[in-house]
Amino acid sequence: MYFIYNESTNPAFNLALEEYLLTRRTGEFLLLWRNARAVIIGRNQNALEEVDLDYARAHNISVNRRISGGGAVFHDLGNINYTVIKDQGKNDFGGYAEFTGPVIAFLKELGVEAQLSGRNDLTVDGMKISGNAQASKNGRIMHHGTLLYNVDVGDLAGVLRPNQAKISSKGIKSVRSRVTNLVDHLPEKMDTLEFLQRLRDFYLRSRPDVVEHRLTPEEMAAVNQLVAEKYGTWEWNFGRSPAYNLQKDQRFDFGLVDVRLSVAGGVIQQVKIYGDFFGMEEISELEQRLTGIPHRREAIAEALAGVDLGRYIHGISQEQFLSLF
């Protein structure tokens, strides 16, 4: 087994590294890593249904899609991630006990009794401290999981909720659970880096065949190419969302504005704008201008460049209008 202590905290790079080791390398790998603040959504999820994007923008929290299924999770430097990648055995996919067993054993050494609960969570005193997910490709399997050690629960609660829009899609929804930080359950307190070092030492002594591996320049270049082509792109992180319908309305001083969208492949297919507002121009002209562009704030703002929105919806500012998308 090759052990990689991945010091990168770039979510796009770290997710790309997992795919690279799963699909382009042979052998067994164990990774320990952390991300800067990010929401990591499952492969089949709709980002808009899982994330308060206004909160994410305001707090510099990125949104990144992984290749495994399951629900959305919040990462920051108080969260530790572990990944096991290997050739897939007959009962490996869905066999969470095998992969989480070493983590449970490590926590037991520290005086914390954790259990595998439900399909893929680890809990302490009935509260979630770890979520796990898997991906399988070409006879290989990747299992990765979180360890909520000392996460900012304010950010976790603030960003892991959709905005007030009404969204209808076939994306996989997250199951919300009560969460707790591991640090609050340790008999012996330690900071995140010491906990990470102890977990690293545990893995290194638990397998006699473990060999530490540092990424080569060629491997780094291949991973960075995956970032540029996939994990760092809007098309993967947002455009990959299942088709959905969105409806959001707000009453302003000048009247009610009700926006309804149909989106597929991340692109706005149809727009309807209703309300009791006043305007001098036909609202259909504005609807047509927004049809066929990516459903992202920057693209909508670009499409509206030079447009006097007040001629369509008297009294509205661009920021107010963008808040409805």
Image: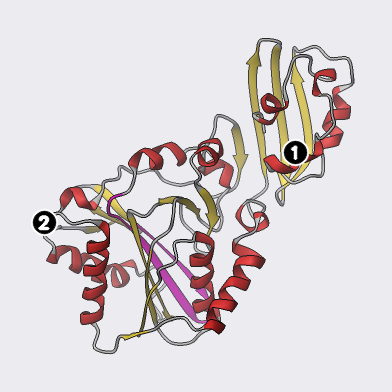
**Secondary structure mostly seen in the magenta stretch:** strand
Q: Is residue 97 above or below residue 252?
A: below
Residue extent of the magenta highlight: 131-150
Residue pointed to by mark 2: 188
Residue sitting at the far front = 217
Residue 127 coordinates in the image, percent (x, y):
25, 46
Residue 1 coordinates in the image, percent (x, y):
35, 85
Residue 262 highlighted magenta (yes or no): no
Given residues 103 and 246, the one toward you in this image is 103
Residue 281 coordinates in the image, percent (x, y):
89, 19
Classify mark 2: helix, strand or loop: loop
Residue name at image x 44 percent, y 55 percent = 36
Residue name at image x 11 percent, y 60 percent = 111
Q: In the rendered structure, which disc, 1 or 2, sits on the residue that comes first in sequence?
A: 2
Q: Is residue 31 visible?
A: yes
Given residues 55 and 265, the one toward you in this image is 55
Given residues 133 and 190, the one toward you in this image is 190
Count of numbered marks: 2
The three-letter code of the residue at mark 1 reads Ile
Give the Cα distance between marks 1 and 2. Answer: 52 Å
Marker disc for residue 247: none
Q: Is residue 124 visible?
A: no
Image position of 239 (left or right of 178): right
Image position of 195 (left or right of 248): left
Residue pointed to by mark 1: 300
